[in-house]
Image: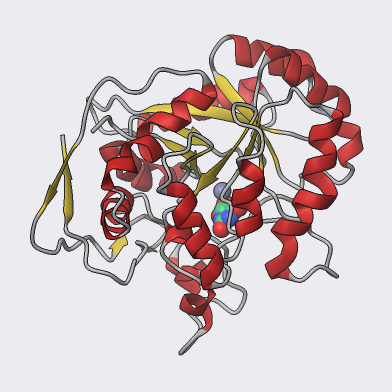
Amino acid sequence: MTRPDDWHLHLRDGAMLNAIAPESARDFGRAIIMPNLLPPIVTSTQALSYKKRIMAALPDGSNFKPLMTLYLNEKTDKNDLSRAHASGLVIAAKLYPAGATTNSDGGVKDFHKLQPILEHMAEIGMPMCVHGEVTDLDVDIFDREAVFIDRILDPMRCRVPDLKVVMEHITTEEGAEYAKSAPGKLAATITTHHLIINRNHILSGGLRPHYYCLPVAKRETHRLALLKAATSGSECYFLGTDSAPHTDALKENACGCAGIFSATNTVSCLAEIFEAAGALDQLENFTSLSGPKFYGLAPNVDKIHLTKGAPITFPEFIKTHLGPVTVFDPGIDLHWQVSN
Ligand code: DOR
Ligand code: ZN
């Protein structure tokens, strides 16, 4: 099938970047790189130098292409945004509500202040990727996505109807429903892990930090709604792994970091669950066709091959100079081997 792309990826920087970039470059053609570094990537100059560091971390001969994003804030420079978009360096801008997740302290507090920037993005056809969770402490963590759609996202889209929006890593039936309400203008990424785990995986029989991410996995009915959406063939849904490495020391911690690292085995995991859902024929739409269509890009020209055989053993963790990073354990046998 057509080589997949990852429309939502965390590559980090420095020693972590160097260790984990090859994991994504192995199976994926392109990836949208999240800007939540410390400090965040807010200008095109920062994006360009980060892109160079990513390219330097790739194995020799790799054709992997990082698609850069800028971290939106109330002070984002519209001209810098346009130039970066027109040059092809930056594909989208990411909206993090302040405090919603890892390194989002510099995110947006007053969404109304973004109005001129969002209008400008709509004019130049630059999509906004959004982490769709409210951060209000009085809203239950399992309701934060649904509340965000009602209170923030829908009113925002009514104020700027031409803005293209990607709801990142949706985790609920409400998210999947809303994402299909404006094809071509609105879409959603779905992660590999949210198609496989529900909240029991995190909390039942012991606390399992390697299944903790944000937005947190919800109850099984929501997982089933996501699986239905991903396997439907609809162009409103495409893969964004949200593969987000943290060292084991930071995960297995009294205050563990949010993030699941799945770059290493994602394609194999997806083939397994699409097959189990009787929808292997929809895998290519989800991983390789619907994403480029939304972003106005051509699909990759090269192919990967998936071959079914005896269960495959993936590494339990990736070694980095900062310590090991555990690879997502789907809890099922994986039979699909990816090759070029
Ligand atoms: O689980 C997550 N980890 N969710 C995010 O939104 C951010 C990510 C990270 O950067 O670690
Ligand atoms: Zn993310």
Horizontal side of residue 109 vs 105, given as left or right: right
Query: Is residue 175 at least partly visible in the picture?
Result: yes
Q: Residue at horizontal 26%, vertical 33%?
A: 59
135 over 212 or under it: above or below: above
Horizontal side of residue 29 vs 210, given as left or right: left
Q: Residue at horizontal 39%, vertical 62%?
A: 323
110 over 266 or under it: above or below: above
Q: Residue at horizontal 26%, vertical 52%?
A: 268
Query: Is residue 16 at least partly visible in the picture?
Result: no
Q: Quadrant of residue 333?
A: bottom left
Q: Position of residue 240 (x, y in %)?
A: 48, 43
209 over 15 or under it: above or below: below
Q: Quadrant of the N terminus?
A: top left
Q: Quadrant of the C terminus?
A: top left
Q: Residue at horizontal 61%, vertical 59%?
A: 172
Which residue ends up furthest to the left in the rendered image?
Answer: 310
Q: Position of residue 221 (x, y in %)?
A: 54, 69
Q: Work out whether residue 131 or residue 219 is closer to the camera in this orientation and state it.
A: 219
Q: Position of residue 84 (x, y in %)?
A: 63, 15
